[in-house]
Structure formats: structure tokens, C-alpha cells
Amino acid sequence: MQKPLPFDAATVRRIAEKYPTPFYLYDEQGMRDACRKLNAAFAWCPGFREYFAVKALPNPYVLEVLKDEGLGADCSSLAELELSERVGLTGEDLMFTSNNTQAHEYQKAADLGAIINLDDLSHIDYLKEHVGLPELLCFRYNPGSAREGNVIIGKPEEAKYGFTEAQLFDGYAILKAAGVKRFGLHTMVASNELNGDFFVETARMVFDLAVRIHQQLGVRMEFVNLGGGIGIPYRPEHKAVDLQAVGQGVKKVYDAMIAGTPLSPLKVMMENGRMITGPHGFLVTTAIHHKHIYRDYVGVDACMSNLMRPGMYGAYHHITVLGKENAPHDRIVDVVGSLCENNDKFAINRPLPAVERGDLLVIHDAGAHGHAMGFQYNGKLRSAELLMKPDGTVKMIRRAETHDDYFATLDFSGLACSK
Ligand SMILES: *Cc1c(COP(=O)(O)O)cnc(C)c1O
């Protein structure tokens, strides 16, 4: 089975003549369309907003595109806050959903006026002591065994994130007594979830909590944040989540539980990363070697330090050998990088056409949690990132690392041999 590409082989070859492989290539139009689809699905909801999970693709040019589509930014660290700030996202354009957070990160979030989403009950006092309590605060709920989770995020009761239900009630009571005026409720229970009903159930769960918190404490939630986690069809046989159906499903629950109650209007927010940029990013790499031992291998010039999802989660990423889309896929190979780690494989036992040295391989669905997870183990360097604009022009939005970058943090001056 094939997965379509938003550009043809000749275009990618032309790009590869200018920018050496490996590189990431992003399709701006695809990202814009994804934003528009999600926004359209929730157009019924006054104040709906998607905060892009910056960690999925932390690049200012991408953030600028998403900002232009009306998205805010969901940040998990000081660097992500600063990145967003430098793109002009400030105040309530920013959601700060962190965990195990340090005071200076909360300080930055507060300075920017970001919506702070606390991960733990004990952080109320921590925030109060180090930064002071803002007028708006949000809590992250962990439903524990009440929800299933999935392989990427794990089971909620084993996950380190969030408040228990009892802690939520305690926490909002503390905030109210401390004079906090505005409240939000957040949860994130799944990642890469392809079943749209899951998000409708998440909405039901947080609406129910918002209603009970209001009844018991008189605390009126201003928004609920359903988290991110909308999955993407990594495999050709997968089907994309029907966003329109998710939006309508959430609306039905909203109409039944919230509309016409004192909680209305309740804003609904999300913070997806993957579904916005994932399918619109491609890792382009060149075949450099073949190897035939107990299995057959195709060696490429990218490695796990460019894309660690297959090694980390056993994730499937579809691979197109450019120009051989219609050739018989009659070779069973492992596609590997050069790390001294045997999980440095982009594909295992994958049927592909015969690959020659110099062929370009396009690794699909690498636009989220791809380049961002890169690392330098084995002295490998992170690649360039390129953005293809809607008019077909290509802009380099991050240069490739060089060996000088690798050596920049080392100090050889105290070594005996340098004296
Ligand atoms: C990673 C993360 C997201 C984004 O997850 P996706 O699977 O990319 O949608 C959103 N919110 C939080 C709190 C996260 O940790």
C-alpha cells in the first residue's frame, strides 16, 4: 500500500541537490489545512482554541504559521515559552502545561501572562511562595484507573502527571480561599489515539467534573482543556480521526451537560501536537549501503538521532523510495542508521522495492516528535529543517548542526596534551 506525498520525486531531488540529506521537509499547506479542519470541527463552541504542543515541532517559522491560523502555544518548559514569546505569542495565547516544574519556569510563565496549568497539589504553595498566585489557574487531572490510556502515554494510574480527583476538589477549594478568580480544568489521557470516541468520552469526563466542582465548591470553570493526543494514520491502512465527528460528539455532550447551566458558556480547548504537524513532515535520507547477513539491510545517512520514534516506541513510519513507488515491493529489509545501537532502525522486515545506493528514501509522518527528539549520541548531528511554502518555494528554517556545534560545549584547554 502507498501513502501519498505532497510533492513529486523530481521536486525532492531538486531540493536534495541544494540541501544535503538527511533533512526534514515540512509542508506548510498541509499544516494550515489541519488547523482549519480542527477549528471548523469546533466552530460551534464559543472560545474554542487549539494550543499547539510546541514540543512536537519547536520551530519559530512553524509556530508563526500556526499562529496565523489562530492557534495558541502549549509550552512545557522555559525554552518553549521563550520560543513562543519570540514569535509574538504572549498572555493567554500561551498555556504552560509542565510537570516537575522549577520556580524560574513558573516565573517566566507568569511574566508572560501564560495560563499556568499546575501538575500537582503541592505546586499551589510552591507557586505562591516563589511567584505568587495569578488570577487564573488551571489543574491537570489524572483519572487513574478510570481511563485506559495507551502505549505512548501509558496507563493513567502509572503516569506521573496530574492530580487525583480528590486532590482536584481540595485544590480548587484552596484557590478559591486564596482569592484566585478564574479557573480551568485540564486532562491529557491518551496520545496518538485514532478512536475519535475517546475524545468525546474525555469531554464527558471533564464536563462531569466541572459540574460537580461547581456544585460542591461554587467554583465556576471558565474552560476545560481536553489535552492533545489525536492520533494520525502512520500506517497506510489506518484511517485519520474524523474531526468533524469528534466536534459534533463533544457538542452533543456539551448540549446535554453544560448548555443552559450556570457553567455555560464553557470554553473548550485542546493542545494537539501530532495531528497538526505530524503528517506534514518528512525525513528525507539517502541510501548509502547494503548489507546481507542473516537479514538484508539498507543503510541510510539518517539515524535514530534524527528520528527516534521507531527505536523508542517501536513506532511504524511509512517509507517511500522516491521514483520506485510502483516497483514491486519484493525485498524484505531492515532500514538502518549508523548508531552503535541495534534499535537504530527506521523499519524492520519491511517490504520495499530494490534500493540502490543513492536512492532517496522519504520517511513519512515525521512532522511531530521527530526532529524535536533529536540527540547527539555517537557524535551524530541534528539535521536541517526545510519548509515548503504553499507557493512551492522552500526555506531553510533551521540549519543542520555542524561538527563545530558538537565541539562547542567541550573544553580541551586543560588537557595535558594541549599544554
Ligand atoms: C505531548 C503533549 C501534548 C501533545 O501530544 P500530541 O500527541 O502530540 O497531540 C499535549 N499536551 C501535553 C500535556 C503533552 O505532554
Image (tube, grey):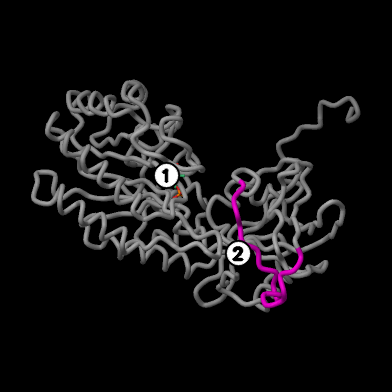
Residue 187 coordinates in the image, percent (x, y): 34, 40
Question: Which residue is nearer to you in this view: 229 or 396?
Answer: 229
The span shown in magenta is: 314-331
Figure check: 126 above or below 87: above
The spot of residue 145 in percent (x, y) is 37, 32
Question: Is 322 covered by the magenta stretch?
Answer: yes
Q: Disc 2 marks which residue?
A: 25
Whether residue 53 sits left or right of residue 203 in the image: it is right
Q: Amino acid at mark 2?
A: Leu
Horizontal side of 93 relative to 402 (left or right) equals left
Residue 177 lies, with reference to residue 159, above or below; the image says above
Q: Residue 297 at what x, y percent from top left? A: 80, 56
Between discs 2 and 1, the one toward the N terminus: 2
In the depicted view, which residue is nearer to us: 60 or 162? 162
Q: What is the tally of numbered marks visible in this picture?
A: 2
Q: Is residue 215 left or right of residue 241?
A: left
